[in-house]
Amino acid sequence: MAYNKPIPAVTAELKPFFDAAKQHKLVVQRCSGCGAYRFPPRAICSTCLSQEAEWVPVSGEGEVFSFNVMHQIYHPGFAPEAPYAVVLIKLKEGAKMISNLTGVAPPDIKIGMPVKAVFETVSDDVTLPKFAPAA
Ligand code: ZN
């Protein structure tokens, strides 16, 4: 089935993230000054103000930090799934990431629910990290 939702642009800033995702690996930036993990990438660390950072692999394990259930259809590609949840995942390493949770109906999503990264290939260039309940 064709993927009918908007596909993120692979910008120079996000290329390391999408290159890793194509290989079903999750990476985030880690500050070279204080070691804080962060996502999305930023030029300056909000903890120590260092401008040095590197992309590093993370476990893909985390928990639901917050979520919102979308009932309004803002793009027709999302209509078949509505209502659907947009989740804020707190990775075990500390960075937070907005994504979707697969395999769970919105009423069954709980704050603190353990999750793990899964990957959905949506085009030749883009594979999206999403999350599923950890077994
Ligand atoms: Zn820092």
Image (tube, helix red, strand yellow):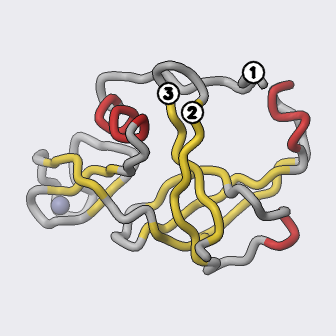
The answer to which quarter of the image holds residue 107 is bottom right
Q: Choose top left, top right, bottom left or bottom right for residue 80.
A: top right
In the rendered structure, find residue 30 and report the number of the disc placed on it: none
Quadrant holding ligand 1? bottom left
Give 64 or 131, whichever is nearer the viewer.
131
Amino acid type assigned to the residue bearing label 3 in the image:
Val
Please, what is the three-letter code of the amino acid marked with disc 2? Thr
Picture residue at 46% right of the left edge, 60% below the top: 96
Residue under label 3, please give it: 126
Tell whether label 2 touches label 1 (CB within 8 Å).
no
| Residue 54 or residue 44, whichever sits in front | 54
| Front: mark 2 or 3 | 2
Q: Quick check: is the Cβ at mark 1 less than 8 Å away from ligand 1?
A: no
Locate the N terminus by quadrant. top right
| Disc 3 residue: CB within 8 Å of ligand 1 | no
User: Which residue appears at 70% of the width and 52% of the height?
Assistant: 86
Marks 2 and 3 sit apart, C-alpha to C-alpha, by 6 Å
Q: Is residue 123 above or below residue 115?
A: above
Cα–Cα gap, marks 1 and 2: 11 Å
Residue 124 x, y percent position in the rendering: 50, 19
Position of residue 37 measured from the top left corner of the image (x, y, whole percent) = 28, 61
Residue at the image point whose x is 28% and y is 55% from the top: 57
Mark 2 and mark 3 lie on one chain; the one further toward the N terminus is 2
* Residue 121 numbered mark, or none: 2
